Image (cartoon, grey):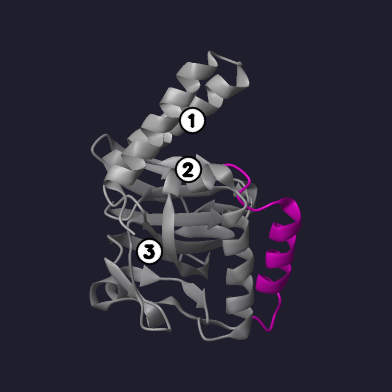
Amino acid sequence: MLIRIPSLLDADTVRYLRGVLDAPDSPWVDGRATAGYHGAEVKHNQQLDEDSPITRELADRVLAATERHPFFISAALPNRAYPPHFNRYSGGMNFGSHIDGAVRVLRSGLKVRTDVSITVFLSEPHEYDGGELRIEDTYGAHEVKLPAGDAIVYPATSMHHVTPVTRGVRLASFFWVQSLIRDDSQRALLFELDNTIQRLNATNADNASRRSLVGIYHNLLREWSET
């Protein structure tokens, strides 16, 4: 299930992040520093130093936005998140086909299973050529290049890659969520049910029927969730 989240970050937040990321003293390092053995073979980009206080401060801003965004919560049903990172592509940089690692380890030692991958675009599409995120699923390959502040949410089990950036600079944030619902097909059903309920709420449909659907949603969530 691929879901676009419009305006996950508002314009002021994007402007602030860009001001920091575009600064000449931003601590960019070789992106392979955080790649696994196989990922390092195909990863050609820059990444903000994950040990930098700047990275942690920007990551907190991104996570705070996700907590305020009901559409994101409905799509990902987050249990815990691995803190956002930030990457930079220019001059032909790319990231070859790969599947994200299944488990990430927080500084505390707590392990996060990567059920859901999230990419938040921080550059406008007209600022660079190439740099499309291509995600493969059972229906083929999907090419994603979104306005700054928009995000794409997709199963971390998906094969994906970033095409070479041939002009300009592509900036993005990326992170992973361990969902309350491990199975992508179950998450998709709950997402569709939640959105159906919201549409019915907007039309003042039969109140008893809406209450029944809300009950079904929460009973399914209770049945399927992992806490």
Which residue bears the numbered disc 1?
195
Q: Position of residue 178 (x, y in %)?
A: 36, 60
Q: What element carries label 3?
A: strand
Closer to the chain start, of discs 3 and 2, is 2
Q: Nearer the viewer, residue 38 or 108?
A: 108
In this picture, is 60 found above or below 99?
below
Q: Which of 12 and 185 is in front in this view?
A: 185
Q: Is residue 2 magenta?
A: no
Identify residue type, mark 2: Ser
Q: How many marks?
A: 3
27 sits left or right of 17 in the view: left
Question: Where does label 2 land, which residue?
Answer: 74
Q: Residue at x 28, y 46 (%)?
A: 224
Q: In this view, does 81 lie above or below 217?
A: below
What is the spatial separation of the Cα atoms under label 2 and label 1, in whole angstroms? Answer: 8 Å
How many neighbours does mark 2 have within 10 angstroms: few (below 14), some (14-19), or many (20 or more)?
some
First in residue order: circle 2 vs circle 1: 2
Amino acid type, callout 1: Asn
**Mark 3 or mark 2: which is in front?**
2
